[in-house]
Image (tube, grey):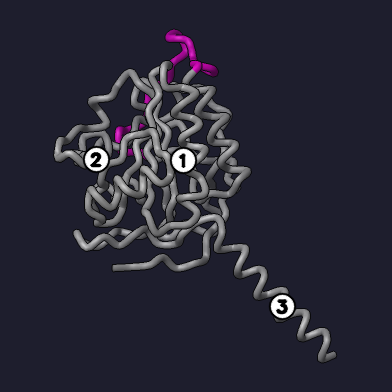
Amino acid sequence: MRAFFSNLVLFIVFAVIFSGLSACSGTASSQRGPVDETAPPANAPSNAEVSKKRSEYPPIASAVATADIKSLDGSTFKVADKMGSVILLNLWATWCGPCRAEMPALVRMQDTHRNQGFEVIGLNTDDETPDEINTFAESMNLNYQIVWADTQLQSSLLKISKFPGIPQSFLIDRDGNLRGVFRGANPADIRKMEELVAKVVNGEGVASEQTVPQPPPADSELPLENDTMDQPKNKPKGK
């Protein structure tokens, strides 16, 4: 019996350690203000391509499309400015291990689809200085744009994903429609993200103009039916 309980304790310890490898729970609480964190419901879906045509996806929320995003050089832009390109918004922080784990895939996607109008935008959720971020980016050989996500933009994205952890990514097609939401850095989900990016960049599954249905409201959320989300357990480092 003593051996049984010893084995049970070891199993629980290993399970907790493994669960912390896929994401950092609770987005980085930047000192710029609180982040509106809404935990996903028990049946919350995520991380899979929905078998729907492009026109059946909702436009990205207007609060995201029109938010002023600050680059490290002090310039600003909006997601709406990039209409015509495929955009992958990625929430991350330098202290987040799972964020670092998925970065090679982001670099690979940027390299592969760079000349096809595809762009990864890394949204830093913390308050590191430009020098700190640039040093980190160089150490990770990042080849995509790094910017800051203020708390308002973070909150708007969390309302879409219903997931209080990082990393998480939002795929937006050339028409400004939200095509996929990916939570955590599970290797299987990273592969699905790469597959979906390739399909969207190459225009696969596009509905004809004659069959385009009426789009949902601008601030509606992405219908995510085939969810395989791993809920991360480990607590992030705060400031």
Q: Nearer the viewer, mark 3 or mark 2?
A: 3
Q: State the SS at label 2.
A: helix
* Residue assigned mark 1: 181
* Residue assigned mark 3: 10
| Amino acid on which disc 2 is placed | Ala
Q: Residues within 10 Å of mark 2 (few under 14, many from 20)?
A: some
* Earlier sequence position, callout 3 versus callout 2: 3
Q: Nearer the viewer, mark 1 or mark 3?
A: 3
- Of residues 30 and 152, the one nearer the viewer is 30
Above or below 67: residue 56: above
- Magenta span has 83? no
Label 3, label 2: how far apart the Cα atoms are = 46 Å
* Residue assigned mark 2: 63
Q: Is residue 48 left or right of residue 123?
A: right
List the single residue furthest toward the bottom.
Answer: 2
Above or below 77: residue 17: below
Q: Which residues are magenta?
A: 202-220
Above or below 1: residue 225: above
| Amino acid on which disc 3 is placed | Leu
